[in-house]
Image (cartoon, rainbow, N blue to C red):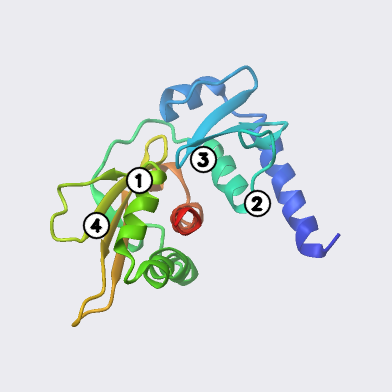
Amino acid sequence: MSQPSEIFKKHYQDYLDKIGGVNPAAVTDILGIQAEQDRYPVPFLGTVYHVSQKGITDPEGQRPGYGLCVILARYILNCPPKVYTDTQWVAFRDFKQTSHFTNVNYFASDTEQAMVKHFSGNLPLLARACETAGGHPDTTQGSYDLAVSFQALPRIGLRLLFNDKDDEFDAQCKVLFHRHSEFYLDPESLAMTGAALAAALKRLS
């Protein structure tokens, strides 16, 4: 087994061990998910995964990719001490803890620019992918060619804003978060959540 795989395996097991010490009542009340015996069903972009001390599994009982495992584990482990409800939409760079240059660049390249590259000139394709992914049209953002909201995780919403290219301008994409999202997930996991949305839409197109 390669060295990176050994590191991922160790981190994955560390997450599972810590999840075993989580107070189920706090997770139920604050995150709004119901514990099922020793595991937590967590919907992520429309698919329900199960998180427990024994492992993280998809609906088929298989372990998802390492990045998604990190997001789901940290979502449970980062459960805040109270419910936060600031649903104002903000850009990733506006979060207080996202000063780390790498996180901001990663989010821009793997989320917003990834969608521009894939969907520029293909707005109907993006619209169909958003619908298939469970997105809801957002009529409050009339200045964009496409505005769609997604429920990434309980308490964490995403808003996709897309203007297609025309004779004067290149395509542009913005992905926004509820401001309170930073209380539920760390910046790296939020950036990974945006990238997961972009990957899902590309896969569905």
Q: Position of residue 109 (x, y in %)?
A: 45, 71
Q: Looking at the image, is mark 4 or mark 2 earlier in the sequence?
A: 2
Query: Which is more toward the observer, 187 or 124?
Result: 124
Single out the mark in the foreground, 4 or 3: 4
- Frontmost of labels 2 and 1 is 1
Question: Within the image, what quadrant is residue 74 found in?
Answer: top right
Residue under label 4, please give it. Answer: 146
Residue 179 seen anywhere in this rendered image of the structure: no
Q: What type is the residue that disc 4 sits on?
A: Leu
Disc nearer the start of the sequence (4/3): 3
Q: Which residue is mark 3?
A: 75
Q: Which mark is residue 131?
A: 1
Of the residues tagged 2 and 3, which is closer to the observer? 2
Task: Give the spatial CA distance, label 2 vs label 3.
Answer: 14 Å
Q: Is residue 142 above or below residue 171?
A: above
Task: Say which residue appears at 43% left-offset and 63% top-offset.
Answer: 111
Whole-number angstrom distance, CA of label 4 to CA of label 3: 29 Å
Disc nearer the start of the sequence (3/1)? 3
Q: Which quadrant, please, contains the N terminus? A: bottom right
Left or right: residue 108 versus residue 50 is left
Q: Is residue 97 left or right of residue 18?
A: left
Residue where numbered disc 2 is placed = 66
Q: Which marked residue is nearer to the observer: mark 4 or mark 2?
A: 4
Distance of label 1 from label 4 (alpha carbons): 12 Å
Question: Of the residues shown, which amino acid type is indicated by label 3?
Answer: Tyr
Give the residue type at disc 1.
Glu
